[in-house]
Amino acid sequence: MKNTDYFAYLVDEIHSVIAATTDENGLPVTCAIDIMDWDENGLYFLTAKGKNFYRRLKQQKYIALTGMKGEDTMSSMALSIRGNVVELGAERLPRLFQKNSYMHRIYPTAESVAALTVFQIYAGSGEWFDLSKKPIERDSFVFGGMEAAQNGYVIGEECCGCRACLTVCPQNCIDLLEGRAVIRQENCLHCGNCMQACPTGAVKRR
């Protein structure tokens, strides 16, 4: 999927997420927020300027968040995003209130709305994880000019084709092609079993 497909899913299907910032001591702090809008330039949410959450966003200019949708663990899809934020102010508030009409019940007057400000996540990376499929499916993406960082494991030329990694893979996502093991990255759990089992040290972290 495209970045904007993930943005749309996050806003329209998940909506409420757990967001993480860090405090003045570098310790993580989480809170629940709604991701209220998206476009090709990123994601948008609001907060009140009197909150500690606002202060942390202004100081760090960074956020990480995760949202899930599903009836239980094995039917769930999760989307995690982390990236740089910028305060946009009040200009986008009318659009966010129009798209998220419940906000009128939380901030019913113009005076109360004056406490709010909009933030944009304009550059970052994301990961999609779908446990409802077997084997699981995962994908990663970047946006706003952020450079992609590779995660997981890869099997190098030292592979002897012994199949040890195949027997310990919980998702059966390692194939033996022309005598050499290859990981299907889109189905990998990143558990590391293959690296532990490999007798030649062919499995490396990406």
Image (spheres, rainbow, N blue to C red):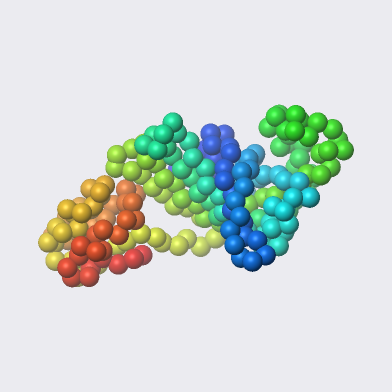
Q: Is residue 113 left or right of residue 192?
A: right
Query: x%, y% of residue 56?
Result: 69, 58
Residue that extends furthest to the right in the rendered view of this protein = 111
Residue shown at the point (46%, 50%) measured from the top left? 127
- Image side of residue 66 versus residue 21, left or right: left
Nearest the viewer among 64 and 7 is: 64
Residue 27: image location, x then y, percent: 59, 62
Could you tell me residue 102's position as x and y percent?
Answer: 70, 29
**Residue occupying image coordinates x 57% and y 34%:** 12
Q: Quadrant of residue 133?
A: top left
Q: How many marks?
A: 0
Q: Residue at x 20, y 65 (%)?
A: 198
**Is 162 rendered above or below residue 14?**
below
Counting from the top left corner in percent of width and height, residue 191 is at 32, 56
Who is closer to the viewer here, 122 or 106?
Answer: 106
Q: Is residue 149 above or below residue 89?
A: below
